[in-house]
Image: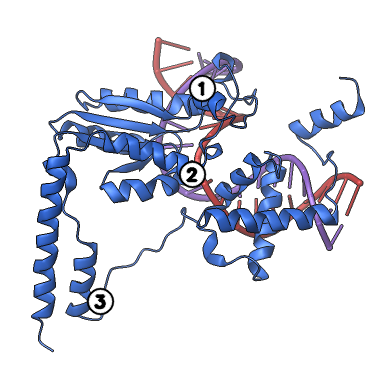
Chain colours: A blue, B red, C purple
Amino acid sequence: MDSTEGRLKQRAESCGPRFTKRRTKAEVSLLRQRIVNVAATYQPLTLRQLFYRLVVRKHIQKTEAGYKAVGRLTGQLRESGDLPWSWIVDSSRMVRQRASYSGLGEFLEQTQRLYRRNLWQDQPEYVEIWCESESAAGVLCAITYEWGVPLRPFKGYGSRTFLYEVARTLREQNKPATCYYFGDRDPSGNDIDRSALESVRRYGSGEFRFVRVAVTEKQVSDWSLPGAPPKRTDSRAKNFRGPCVELEAIEPDRLRDLCRDCIEQHIDSHALEQHKRNEKAERETLNRMRESLPG
DNA sequence: GGTTCACATTCTTGGACATG
DNA sequence: CATGTCCAAGAATGTGAACC
C-alpha cells in the first residue's frame, strides 16, 4: 500500500496530472489494429460501444483516459481512411427535415416499402422495452423495430413529461402489459428504474408488470462482466453492494437475444399469422395503386 | 419544515492545460 | 508531440447538506 505504484494508482484514480505509464509506439500501433478489428466485427456502433468492446477484451483500461485514447485514435483512423466513416455512428445528433419526394411514384414506392400494420392491436397483450441510455437503444432497436414494440430510452432519469406519457400509454392499453428494462448496475443506475416505476404508477398507469432484464447480479457472475467499484461521490453509493457494471459490458448480440425473448413470449401465433396475411394484402393494394399511376 | 445549492446520472466531442 | 484530466454544452432528474 505504501509502494510507489500504489500511490500512483491512487492518484490516477482520483484526479490531477498523469501518473500512469505512457504507451509505446508498438502498443499504440497494436491498439489501432484492435480498434479496426473490433469496429469491423460490430459495425455500425457508437464510439462508446467500441470502447466497451475493447474494455471487455482487456485491450484498454476502463477509465476516462482510456475512453479518450480510443476516441483520439479512432478519430485519426477515420481521418486517414483506415476506418470507414460509416462504421461509427452518432445516435445523439440527428437531422430534422420535412419528408419530400420526387413525385407520387417515389412516395408510393416508399410507403409500400415502409408500411407496417400495427401488430399489437390484434395481440392479447402489450409490451414495451425501456432502457437507460441512447446507446442501449441503439443496440436494442433492431429487435424492437422488427416487432413494432415501443422502445423508450430514458437518458438518465426520465423526465416527468416522458414518464407521464408512458403512464398514459399504458393506461390506454386495456390489456395485460409488461415493461422490460435494460440499464446499468450502479448506484444511480439501480435507482433510475425504481424512480421511473414509482412515477409511472403515481401518474396512473394502471396495472402492469415490470421486469429488470439487465444488468443483474447473476449476469455479472455468469458472464464475468467487467466491473468497477462505485464512485464514492455518488450519494447513493453507501447502500450499494457489489461492482458497478454498465450495460455495454454485455455483448450486443446477447442483449438483442434477451430483448427478443422478452417480446416473443407475449406473441400469440394465431394473431400473428392473421396479421401477416392482412399486411401482405395491404401492401399489394399499395402496389396496385402505384402501378395505376399515369406515366 | 421548505428552499437552495452542489454534485450525481444520461451522451458526445473538442478545447484548455499539465505532464512526460 | 503524445497523453491524461477537467470542463463545456444541451435538459431533466435524484440525494443530501446547508440555510432561512
Q: Secondary structure at mark 2?
A: helix
SS at circle 3:
loop
Which residue shows up at 9% across the image and 74% down it?
A289
**Residue ID at (90%, 20%):** A2
- Tell me, yes or no, whether dots 3 and 2 are on the same chain: yes
Relative depth, front residue between A247 and B20: A247
Residue A49 in picture, x, y percent from top left? 55, 47
Residue A235 figure quarter: top right
Label 1 is placed on what type of residue?
A: Glu
- Above or below for A157 versus A64: above
Q: Are marks 3 and 1 on the same chain?
A: yes
Q: Which residue lies under the disc numbered 3?
A: A101
Q: What's the CA distance linking mark 3 and mark 1?
A: 50 Å
Badge 2 amino acid? Pro
Left or right of residue A193: residue A46: right
- The first of marks 3 and 2 along the sequence is 3
Q: Amino acid at mark 3?
A: Tyr
Whole-percent x, y for residue A234 in the image: 59, 25
The answer to whether A201 appears left or right of A74 in the picture is left
| Image spot of residue A173 (x, y percent) | 15, 34
Q: In terms of secondary structure, where does tag 1 sit?
A: helix
The residue furthest bottom is A295
Place residue C17 in its image quadrant.
top right
User: Which numbered circle lies on residue A252?
Assistant: 2
User: Which-is-in-front pick, marks 3 and 2?
Assistant: 2
Residue bearing the label numbered 1: A217
Q: What subunit carries mark 2?
A: A
* In the image: residue A192, left or right of residue B11: left
